[in-house]
Amino acid sequence: MRHLSKLLTLMLAIAAFGCGDDPNIAIELEPAGENCPQGGLKFTDGDTVHYSCDTPAITEAPGENCATGGLKITGADGDFYLCEIGSHLEIAHVPAGSDEHSCVGAAMKITIHGTPDEVKYICLASDYVPAPVLKTLDNLLYAYVYAYVDGHPDLILSCMEDEETRKDFQADLDSWLALMPLLRSCMINAFSAAGPPPPSEFMDDYFYCASAHALALGECHSKAYDAVKDAESPEDRCDEAKYGEVFHPCMNLLEEEYEERCNPEVAPEPTASELAWVMTFQRAATFYGCERLVAF
């Protein structure tokens, strides 16, 4: 979905819940940002806003599918098109667990009136995942990649003299980056299956402790990289000792903060509902295949 950030936002005002009413529901592409880190779809119904951050959607140029242009969307059951105002559309929010759709979480039901009517569903997994959690999740995944390559990939590649070694390293890195959207989608599915986490101090600590170590790795690798990347000679730029002079103190400091907050002896005790949510979340992550990211 990264290409969405390069597209102009396309607004489709859509009349809903009866003919002749003033349009009060809109669908538009949501650019990459706080609400959807990689972009997505935004539904606005009066004062209510829903985001579908993992739904592939692109602008559709005027042509056979949409005479004057529109959106091509990959919904729960395949691709469909939303063209400019013409056909009457009806939109409804359908909660998670409904037999109507195949989405893990909630869904947006779109009825395209015609002969016959068509019903499409767009999954709204992000309804259950607050934007700050999505941002933390993305940072967490990238931090795992940095940990895997044991440093900043640009630096490692520049310090490798053997071309074959560079190719092998780049291939490994590319394979990890290619898995990122799948891992992120897996985590969002796990959130959707568990439902909204209970707001509490325990849950705040739970999410912090889940990501603190990996985020520290990413931050400290970046600081160490910044300290050596502009060195004039390859020897200085690739000096592991100089890299470590920044990396290791940084990790020690952040690990102290992590251990102080995440010490089981001082951590708040979870309530029954909080513990039940955590267990459901971890089981869902195991089911979807990303249990390593929530093994905390």
Image (cartoon, rainbow, N blue to C red):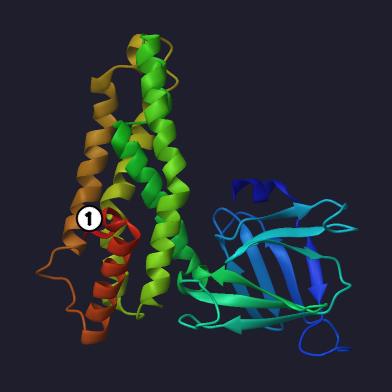
Q: Which residue is mark 1?
A: 257
* Occupied quadrant, residue 79: bottom right
Q: Seen in the image, is 90 located left or right of residue 270? A: right
Is residue 136 visible in this depiction of the protein? no
Is residue 199 visible in this depiction of the protein? yes
Looking at the picture, does residue 227 appear above or below residue 220?
above
Looking at the picture, does residue 147 appear above or below residue 136?
above
Looking at the picture, does residue 159 appear above or below residue 259?
above
Which corner quadrant holds the C terminus? Answer: bottom left
Residue at (20%, 43%) from the top-left corner? 252
Name the spot of residue 51 as percent of width and height, x first: 59, 69
Name the spot of residue 115 as percent of width and height, x first: 82, 77
Q: Seen in the image, is 126 located left or right of residue 33? A: left
Q: Seen in the image, is 69 located left or right of residue 108? A: right
Name the spot of residue 215 as percent of width and height, x first: 33, 49
Name the spot of residue 49 as percent of width and height, x first: 63, 76
Looking at the picture, does residue 279 appear above or below residue 238?
below
* Occupied quadrant, residue 237: top left
Between 296 and 100, the residue placed more toward the observer is 100
